[in-house]
């Protein structure tokens, strides 16, 4: 009896050790990473962002999207920020990014401010993670303590950006697979999609839903007809595909749970948005219902899922480098 107790408790202890080991190898980042080397890093990022928001209310949305598109391609390593050069085929020219991602000039301004205070310390990958958090809290969303210590890549992966970033025309099954491929689950997918509570999307990325959906000759039946009429004003059939509409027609520039109440009312802008609620039998439906009726539940999940996304394959230790200019590899 006694010896079996000892045996089972030592088994229990080694299970704990194993769990700790797994947790430790999974997240090498830390919320105190710059506490001694650049204690004001987060304040500096927030200050530049606040300034930028005064002339462009959309900029916070654009910056959190950069963090997402960075993390999904070989991890959160600042690779999306590199410009074309002799050795770099820029991710900026990948299908999901070209004529679409924005905010690179603000990233450069943040980098300059940080280099002035603490030269050579804060990575460009961490700038994106900090700017994403500041964007959400400045627009009324939750705060969380950003895990830091990522280093910057020496390479970009344009082909990876083409294949790994979800498209708004994809099925829920395919989008779920892209999240699973980077270690994110269905709850993360629904929570993180809630970032479409602010920002804009171009007509070319959803106007097929307004006129001729999947070659049926009819609009998407999961799009509310009154909302469709409004969108047809912004996106006439023969108009410019570069016109933009608010991703959240209810409260376009606030970070809140209206994205989810929109979905419940068939007012998701992108096909990929509405699929979360309108795909028959999907596991995402009940999560959308929860978030649409409980903003606290959404905010809690969103904060945790942002930490999960920020943990995707970071470069740490002596891998990569701290770029002094986010647009290029040091010394190039
Ligand atoms: C689930 C799969 C997703 C798809 C298919 C998707 C697709 C899109 C598309 C097509 C746009 C419009 C781009 C344009 O018009 O140029 C967009 C904008 C945006 N996305 Fe997503 N997205 C997804 C997930 C996410 C995630 C995980 C985040 C962040 C956590 C995010 C944040 C944003 C934001 C904030 C905007 C507005 C950007 C701006 O106004 O500049 N998206 N997304
Ligand atoms: C950090 O910010 C505080 C006030 O927020 C300021 O007093 C201090 O000088 C700043 N430190 C550096 C290194 O910029
Ligand atoms: C980007 O937009 C410009 C016009 O603004 C257009 O000439 C170019 O073909 C577009 N590129 C892509 C890949 O859509
Ligand atoms: C990625 O997609 C873009 C636009 O669709 C294309 O121009 C580019 O050649 C692709 N790059 C790679 C490496 O596949
Ligand atoms: C889903 O992915 C499969 C395999 O990659 C592809 O053949 C198919 O076209 C995709 N479907 C949609 C709707 O995106
Ligand atoms: C809708 O698209 C399909 C396939 O692209 C096309 O054959 C059809 O003529 C279009 N219908 C209308 C009404 O434009
Ligand atoms: C809303 O969600 C929070 C966080 O999950 C939970 O504590 C709370 O009980 C929920 N409220 C309601 C009314 O269900």
Image: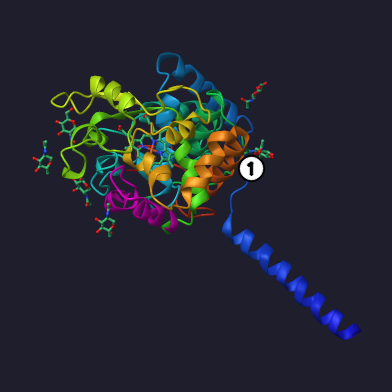
| Residue at figure coordinates x 19%, y 37% from the top left | 218
Q: Estimate how packed mark 1 is, as few (under 14), some (14 to 19) or many (20 or more) residues with alpha carbons within 10 Å.
A: few
Specify whether 104 is left or right of 189. Answer: left
**x then y, percent, for residue 311:** 53, 50
Q: Is residue 107 visible?
A: no
The local secondary structure at tag 1 comes to loop
Specify whether 8 is left or right of 262. Answer: right
| Residue closest to the far right | 2
Specify whether 313 is left or right of 74. Answer: right
User: What is the magenta segment's predominant secondary structure?
Assistant: helix
**x then y, percent, for residue 180:** 44, 57
Most foreground residue, 65 or 210: 210
Please, is residue 330 above or below residue 296 in the view?
below
Q: Quadrant of the N terminus?
A: bottom right
Q: Which residue is mark 1?
A: 31
Please, is residue 18 above or below residue 231 in the view?
below
| Residue closest to the far top | 54
The color scheme shown is rainbow
Which image quadrant for residue 13? bottom right
**x then y, percent, for residue 20:** 68, 62
Q: Which residues are magenta?
A: 155-180
Q: Quadrant of the C terminus?
A: top left
| Residue at figure coordinates x 31%, y 42% from the top left | 168
| Residue at figure coordinates x 59%, y 49% from the top left | 29
């Amino acid at each position: 009896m006694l010896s079996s107790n000892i045996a089972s408790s030592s088994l229990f202890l080694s299970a704990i050790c194993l769990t700790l080991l797994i947790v430790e190898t999974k997240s090498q980042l830390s919320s105190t990473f710059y506490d001694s080397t650049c204690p004001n890093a987060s304040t500096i990022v927030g200050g530049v962002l606040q300034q930028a928001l005064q002339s462009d209310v959309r900029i916070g949305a654009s910056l959190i999207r950069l963090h997402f598109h960075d993390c999904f391609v070989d991890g959160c390593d600042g690779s999306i920020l590199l410009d074309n050069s002799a050795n770099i085929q820029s991710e900026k020219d990948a299908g999901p990014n070209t004529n679409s991602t924005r905010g690179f000039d603000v990233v450069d301004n943040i980098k300059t401010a940080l280099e002035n205070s603490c030269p050579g310390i804060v990575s460009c990958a961490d700038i994106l993670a900090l700017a994403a958090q500041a964007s959400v809290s400045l627009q009324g969303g939750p705060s969380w303590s950003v895990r830091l210590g990522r280093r910057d890549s020496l390479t970009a992966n344009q082909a990876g950006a083409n294949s790994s970033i979800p498209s708004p025309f994809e099925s829920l099954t395919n989008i779920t697979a892209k999240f699973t491929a980077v270690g994110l689950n269905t709850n993360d997918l629904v929570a993180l999609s809630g970032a479409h509570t602010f920002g804009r999307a171009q007509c070319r990325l959803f106007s097929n839903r307004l006129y001729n959906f999947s070659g049926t000759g009819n609009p998407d039946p999961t799009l509310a007809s009154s909302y469709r009429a409004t969108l047809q004003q912004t996106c006439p059939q023969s108009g410019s595909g570069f016109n933009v509409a608010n991703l959240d027609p209810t409260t376009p520039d606030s970070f809140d749970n209206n994205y989810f109440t929109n979905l419940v009312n068939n007012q998701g802008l992108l096909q990929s948005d509405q699929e979360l609620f309108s795909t028959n039998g999907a596991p995402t439906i009940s999560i959308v219902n929860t978030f649409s009726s409980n903003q606290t539940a959404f905010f809690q999940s969103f904060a945790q899922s942002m930490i999960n996304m920020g943990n995707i394959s970071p470069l740490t230790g002596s891998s990569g480098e701290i770029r002094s200019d986010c647009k290029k590899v040091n010394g190039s």
